[in-house]
Image (spheres, helix red, strand yellow):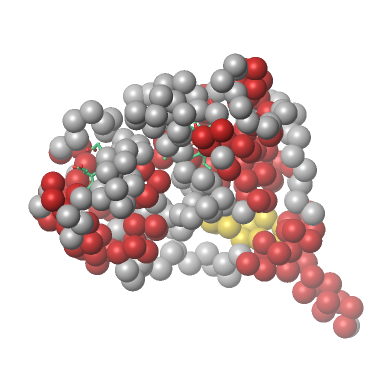
Amino acid sequence: MNVFAKTIGFSLGLTLVFTSVTQLLPQVEGEAPVERKVDLGSLTMDDFVAMGEDLFMNKGTCTLCHKPAPLGRAPDIQGMDMVSISAKRLADERYQGEAKDAAGYILESMLEPSKFVVAGWGKKGSNDTVSPMPHIDKPPIQLSAMEIDAVIAYLQAKDGNEVTVSLPSPEAAAEVAAAAPAAGGAAPAPAVTAEEALGKYACSSCHAMDSEDVLVGPGLGTIGARLSEAGIRQSIVDPAAVIVEGFPPAMPPDFAEKMTVKELQMIVTFLAEKK
Ligand code: HEC
Ligand code: HEC
């Protein structure tokens, strides 16, 4: 009996529930989150690849920037075979990183994006030496090492390449399962401060908040001196209404549906005070 109870406890401990609703970009209210259960004890490479795809589309926020032109703000890596592209990058005379193979290059792109900046995609004015891509292991995105491996597995597998990252060990999997949200995958709670709301919607992936440095979008360090509260509100809820000169229309158009009224108000007030 005891052994039976223990076994049950153990296999529950290895069940990771993850949802495609992300911390950062919650779905429209009322739309049921797609929930996927993965038993990490019997995780197959196909499961791991599927998990990587889900992370790429959702929690990782990769598709905020990596999508086809003209909307993409980064190479369209879903439309590229990243394994053969990686070989090209490693052979590029500008390459100064430490990666030795495709998995290493993809990993380095996520952890230290400025090690190699794809020509034409660098931060404005940096002459392709500084990448506008956020560090994927740091807030606000903050994928775990296991999640990052899953994304690499997905990028290798999607074009039929051999997957070279290993499946997580049962110990690593158990740790993640322990930290995973309780079953049921509740939608992320509304943010209670403006800073929290800016993190939740990944604004700082594209905007410097304390300076006028250009990332993907303009710096917002003194936005309150440039725009009225109404103007700031409009640029969030209806970004297509006014496109800042010299920038692509890359701001996600659906914040209005995703934010609570209070979150929007907190962000607008916070930004209006930045002068
Ligand atoms: C805020 C925009 C942004 C987000 C979000 C983002 N990236 Fe990037 N990424 C870029 C830009 C811009 C480049 C090209 C410049 C460079 O080489 O760093 C890039 C480059 C890359 C490259 C190298 C591509 C090549 O052709 O060599 C990989 C791989 C990559 N990103 C993976 C990811 C993954 C995986 C995620 C999500 C976990 C992600 N990126 C999220 C902007 C972004
Ligand atoms: C994928 C990148 C991206 C994300 C994420 C993003 N923005 Fe933007 N944002 C842009 C770009 C590009 C522009 C400039 C083009 C335009 O006007 O739409 C912009 C413009 C703006 C402007 C107008 C700036 C000016 O100088 O007039 C404000 C304000 C702003 N964003 C706020 C936000 C807030 C708040 C969030 C999070 C809720 C956010 N953005 C998320 C890319 C992004």
* Residue 97 located left or right of residue 265: right
Choose between 81 and 125: the one closer to the eye. 125
Residue 192 picture location, percent across and down: 33, 71
Which image quadrant is residue 243 in? top left
- Give the residue at x 63% y 57%: 37
Residue 181 visible in the displayed image:
yes
Is residue 235 toward the left or the right of residue 123 in the image? left
Q: In the rendered image, which quarter contains the N terminus?
A: bottom right
Tell me which residue sits at (36%, 43%) in the image.
206
Q: Is residue 98 above or below residue 195?
A: above
In the image, taking residue 175 as reference, residue 131 lies left or right, namely left
Quadrant position of residue 14: bottom right
Quarter placement of the C terminus: bottom left
Depth order, front residue of 169/8: 169
Q: Residue at x 72, y 28 (%)?
A: 101
Residue at point 29%, 48% (across, down)? 211
Q: Position of residue 2 (x, y in %)?
A: 88, 83
